[in-house]
Amino acid sequence: GAVVSQHPSRVICKSGTSVKIECRSLDFQATTMFWYRQFPKQSLMLMATSNEGSKATYEQGVEKDKFLINHASLTLSTLTVTSAHPEDSSFYICSGRGRVAEAFFGQGTRLTVV
Amino acid sequence: QKEVEQDPGPLSVPEGAIVSLNCTYSNSAFQYFMWYRQYSRKGPELLMYTYSSGNKEDGRFTAQVDKSSKYISLFIRDSQPSDSATYLCAMGVANSKLTFGKGITLSVRP
């Protein structure tokens, strides 16, 4: 299957700082990128959907000013958690989809805000 | 009624058993059906992808889709301890987000 590379895999940051998570599609062009959040032993919670070159569409209840998504190219999308707080600690996963229907996931980023 | 229902489990089977995982759905517009496997603290990995009704086999894995019953299944033959993971069904329509089941945790006992 296609590969989506997500970095960093783990990050610890201080409360009030911002953290950027990168996702790159290595062998396909991700026209759409999905960003998810996952709490322990729970399923994926879609945060937002971004199409290359367009503004992201956020799910209800997700603060767009807090979770900034950029999808400037067909191979790179970023999620920036701004002014992070301990309640933002979670597992964040990106997923890219190209011309086909399947979506391929990154390895995930475990964010801990202290 | 939720769009996608998946038995929450957990499910524990002995090594070598045949495992059957299932999801039902309510949206008749769904065209694409996928199964993902997720190991702890990792991103989901695409296992099987099927379009519309039918069966698809890949090694020890078989995916079935019955659109008339709005029911999909994943069968794992000769299950191995390395198959122990959470399995998520997902489905959708073209150019739209995927809808996921809640996932079922499978444990294969040696």
Image (cartoon, rainbow, N blue to C red):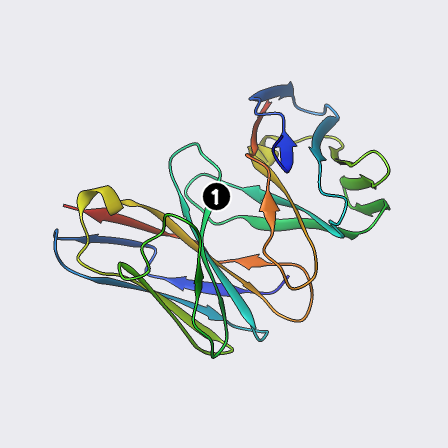
Residue type (three-letter) at the residue carrying disc 1? Leu
Q: In this view, does A87 lie to the left or right of A16?
A: right
SS label for mark 1: strand
Q: In this view, does B109 lie to the left or right of B71?
A: left
Q: Quadrant of the N terminus of chain A?
A: bottom right
| Foreground of the two, B66 or B12 | B66
Q: Which residue is drawn at 64% across and 20% down?
A: B13
Q: In this view, does A69 lie to the left or right of B35?
A: left
How far across and down, in percent of the image, does residue A101 sit?
A: 68, 61
Q: Mark 1 points at which residue?
A: A44
| Foreground of the two, A9 or B33 | B33
Task: Report how many numbered discs are placed on residues in the image.
Answer: 1
| Vertical side of B26 occupied by B108: above or below | above
| Vertical side of B76 occupied by A50: above or below | below
| Vertical side of A23 occupied by B50: above or below | above
How far across and down, in percent of the image, does residue B22 sit?
A: 71, 31
> Hey, which quadrant is residue A70 in on the image?
bottom left
**Label 1 CA crowd tier, 10 Å (few <14, some 14–19, many 20+):** many
Q: Residue at x 57, y 50 (%)?
A: B45
Q: Which residue is drawn at 45% across and 47% down?
A: B42
